[in-house]
Amino acid sequence: MSILSTMDNLNPHPYSLQRRKFIRWLAMGAAAIGAPALVFNYSNLLKPDATGPEDELIELCGDKALFSIGKRWTENNPAENNLAAIKASLLKGSTIANYDNCNTQQLINFVHAKSKAEFARMETMITDGWVLTQTDCRIAALHFLNHSQNT
């Protein structure tokens, strides 16, 4: 009996291929979970150089989408189709007295916390393909009204 005929009779270890597949899937899963976290950490979202809460949404959704969302919000909520009403709604529950004369970072932190709390309570809506909170839509409406006043 030759060595080659003996090797033909040997079966490969049944776990070696499954183990390799498992390791590959584990690596792909880690990359799929880790990549978005890295992108979010190194993006400009929630950075202190933002000039207002709308900057974060502009970076996330884009200016055109935010403009469209804001326009739709003002059309569907006639009580909030002016700047004063939207600013008052955004500051509800805050210690900030005046929207225009406040610390920008404090305002951004408050609006972000408010939006995060609404997401946690599942108080979301789908608008133009985006899942947003009412706070996010109000920020978009504020952006829309500011833009339409300036033009």
Image: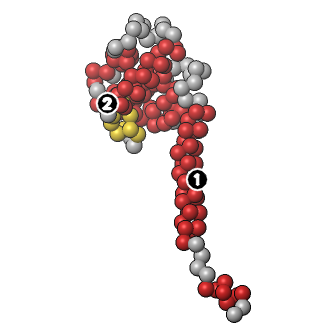
First in residue order: circle 1 vs circle 2: 1
Which residue is outermost to the bottom? 1
How far apart are the two marked residues, 1 and 2, measured between alpha carbons?
A: 33 Å
Residue located 48% across and 8% down the image: 102
Of residue 86 and residue 3, the one placed in the foreground of this image is 3
Residue at label 1? 27
Quadrant position of residue 136: top left
Crowd rating for badge 1 (residues with CA inside 10 Å; few <14, some 14–19, many 20+): few
The answer to which of 53 and 12 lies nearer the viewer is: 12
Task: Tell me, yes or no, whether the two marked residues, 1 and 2, touch with CB atoms within 8 Å.
Answer: no
- Which residue is identified by label 2? 121
> Residue 59: in sight, yes or no?
yes
Looking at the rendered structure, the kind of residue marked 2 is: Arg
Residue 76: percent from the left, percent from the top? Answer: 29, 30
Q: Is residue 20 above or below residue 109?
A: below
Residue pictured at 58% horizontal, 67% vertical: 16
Regarding mark 2 in the picture, which secondary structure is present there?
Answer: loop
With respect to residue 53, does 128 lie above or below? below
Q: Is residue 142 visible?
A: no
Where residue 22 appears, x then y in whole percent?
Answer: 54, 60
Q: Answer with the quarter of the image where residue 6 lies.
A: bottom right
User: In the image, residue 7 lies at what x, y percent?
Assistant: 66, 84
Quadrant housing the N terminus = bottom right
Local SS, label 1: helix
Residue located farthest toward the front when viewing the structure as drawn: 1
Amino acid, disc 1: Ala
Q: Residue at x 35, y 39 (%)?
A: 126
Of the residues tagged 1 and 2, which is closer to the observer? Answer: 1
Instruction: Give the side of residue 67 with respect to residue 123, left or right.
Output: right
**Tag 2: Cα neighbours inside 10 Å, few (<14), some, or many (≥20)?**
few
> Quick one: 120 or 136, which is closer to the camera?
120
Q: From the top left corner, tell me how far across and down residue 103 is, in percent.
A: 51, 10
